[in-house]
Structure formats: structure tokens, C-alpha cells
Image (cartoon, rainbow, N blue to C red):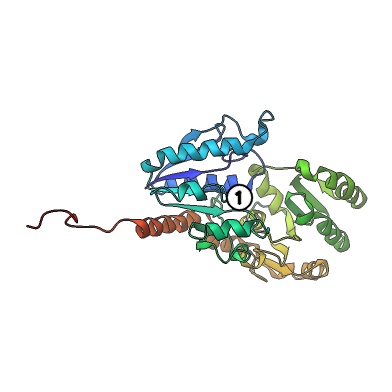
Amino acid sequence: MHIAQVAPLTEAIPPKLYGGTERVVSWLTEELIALGHEVTLYASGDSVTAARLDAVWPRALRLDGAVRDPNALHMLMLERVYRRAGDFDFLHFHLDYYPFSLFSRQSTPFVTTLHGRLDLPEHQPVFDAFCHVPVVSISNSQRRPLPQAHWVSTVHHGLPERLLTPRPVKPSYFAFLGRIAPEKGVDRAIRIAQHCGMPFKIAAKVDRVDREYFDEQIHPMIKETKAEYIGEISDKDKSEFLSGAVALLVPIDWPEPFGLVMIEAMACGAPVIAFNRGSVPEIVEDSVTGFVVEDVEGAIGAVDRLAQLSREKIRKEFEKRFTARRMAQNYLAIYRSLAERIAPPLRLVADDAPAL
């Protein structure tokens, strides 16, 4: 198949540091190519891929301070895809609802993976209007606010099997990985570690919008408890960081659509202690790959049970459920199903052909 992958321009593919959606698009693109398919990737010009790169803008928008209206560039990219749509067997978008209107008016089969939260009131009229557009969820829990959407499948994210691996280090601290924001619960993670008397390491980015929250609330807690703030780390540092963790703490307070950090920890054999919100009970198998808890007290109680878990088994569960190869195969099944569904029926004789 010749497949178009259409990514956000916010980050490069793959992103230099943080960037969940863009990392998933990269892994999916490379796996599709490894499986023998032709892929054109629509993304920023600083992306690195084995696919044919169609660059709408030379640099990731996060790194380009001159761009003040990212919507304009995304609209341009959609138009470029639309003009070439007939060259592809399938179009796969990662741009939320932006493609819905334009691509409903053309014949090439397409699907959109929805990567973000869907529980905002303004989503309701959009999905009422476009209830026929095929969409993929990244967890079953993500679907709940929008039962009217045309869900064709749930595809859990997957990592390249050897991207992160267990390292021979002695686990000695609790870890927090990802992004510091109120809904991510790093303040609760600090309290859990403090109560358990466990060293705590935080490897996370701070977005501009969350800088005040970090400066006023989180940084004083870090100083008070002597937690170690490492900052944002890349994939090359994660195996060592997560292998050294007694557990990854994920005390979220929002409907997390997926949560890549949880499967990153599993890839390294590290257990996950996570709050029962959003996708967590779909990703973490309780008492196998970690513990699903309701609150801080439940997390503290789960710490005593960590010794019951096998880090080798956690890694095997990752290999069974959360590899990029499995993700790509699931998406290929969707592509084929949707392409067959809209293909015109085969006619041996044209309707207006003269009878023989």
C-alpha cells in the first residue's frame, strides 16, 4: 500500500525531546516501511524518517519562534495532502478533527487517530456533525465522552521492541517521567515518595503554560523533600533511568487517553503505580505490571507489594502487548477494512454497455 501519514507540525518526527503523538507517528511510519509498505510522511522539514518526507515547514513549530499562527501552516498541509490524495491508497491523519470536513469530500479512504482528551463540551457539536467520519481511539476509556463518534477500532500505542530495554542496575528510587502539570500529579508523587522514605527522581519537561505552577508549587516541594529534578530526558537516557526505578509513579488526576510513560516503564521491567483514571486500568495489569490505585493512600499501600512482581514478566507483557510492530499490524487491518468498505463493487459489464 502507498500510505500517507499526516503528523502535527508542532514537533519533528521523531521529536527531539518530549512529544507523545509525534513519537507514535514516527514509530508507526518506520514499522509500516519495515513491513514493506510505501509511506509518505507529511511533517516538519527537520524530521528524520525512512519515508518520503513532504515538508510543509522547515522546522518544528515548537522550535520556530517566528511562527505565530500554527493553524495557518496546518491548513496549508491539509490542502497539499488533498491535492495529492489520489496518489495514495490510504490517508492516516493525526490532527484531531481538522481533516474531517475537507477529506469527507474526496474518495481516498482515510482515518484519524484521536490522540488527546475528548471530554470538553465543545467536542460534542463537532462529533455530532461528523458522526460518519471514521476515527480510532488510543484507549477504550478515551471514547466515553463521544459515543456518537464513528469509532472503527481502539489501537493501543506501541514502542519499537528494542528502543528501551532493562539495564543491569539496582533499582533504588521512585521515578516520575513526562511533563509537569497539575493534572499529572507530580505533587502527589512527591508526597508518596516522602511518606515511603524513598529517593525520588523527576525527569520531566515544564511547558511555558505550566512554568508558574512549577515555580510556585512544585519547585518548593522539590527543595523541601530533596527530590532530584533531572529535567527533560530523551529516549537514549530512559532505559537507565527507568531500570533504576523501584517503580514509576503515575498519580494522574485527569482522563489520560493513553500514557506512553507507563509502557516505557514496562519495556524496562519497571512496575507502575498509577491512579485509576482514564486509560490506566487498560494499560496496567493490576498485580502483574504494577498496581492500579485510587489515591495517595492506596499508592503507599501498594509499595509493600512491589516485591511480589517480576520485572522479567513485566518486560514480557510489554513485548506481548505494546510493541510498534503490533501497533502497525493493527493499523494495517484498519486500512484494509476501510478501503474494502468504500471500494466500488466490481462490475463485469458496464451499466450502459450494449447487451451481447
Q: Quadrant of residue 194?
A: bottom right
| Label total for image | 1
Left or right: 154, with 174 as reference point = left
- Residue occupying image coordinates x 59% and y 62%: 139
Left or right: 23, with 331 as reference point = right
- Residue occupying image coordinates x 48% and y 35%: 53
- Residue occupying image coordinates x 53% and y 33%: 56
Q: Is residue 147 above or below residue 264?
A: below
Left or right: 121, with 24 as reference point = right
- Residue occupying image coordinates x 87% and y 60%: 197
Residue at the right extreme of this rendering: 224
Q: Residue beneath label 1, please?
A: 164
Q: Is residue 279 visible?
A: yes
Q: Is residue 189 above or below residue 178?
A: below
The x and y percentages for residue 297 are 83, 69
- Given residues 93 and 191, the one toward you in this image is 93
The x and y percentages for residue 67 are 66, 31
Residue type at mark 1 is: Leu
Residue at the left extreme of this rendering: 356
Q: Secondary structure at mark 1?
A: loop
Q: Residues within 10 Å of mark 1 (few under 14, many from 20)?
A: many
- Given residues 191 and 200, the one toward you in this image is 191
Q: Is residue 174 visible?
A: no
The x and y percentages for residue 330 are 46, 58
The x and y percentages for residue 165 are 61, 52
Q: Quadrant of the C terminus?
A: bottom left
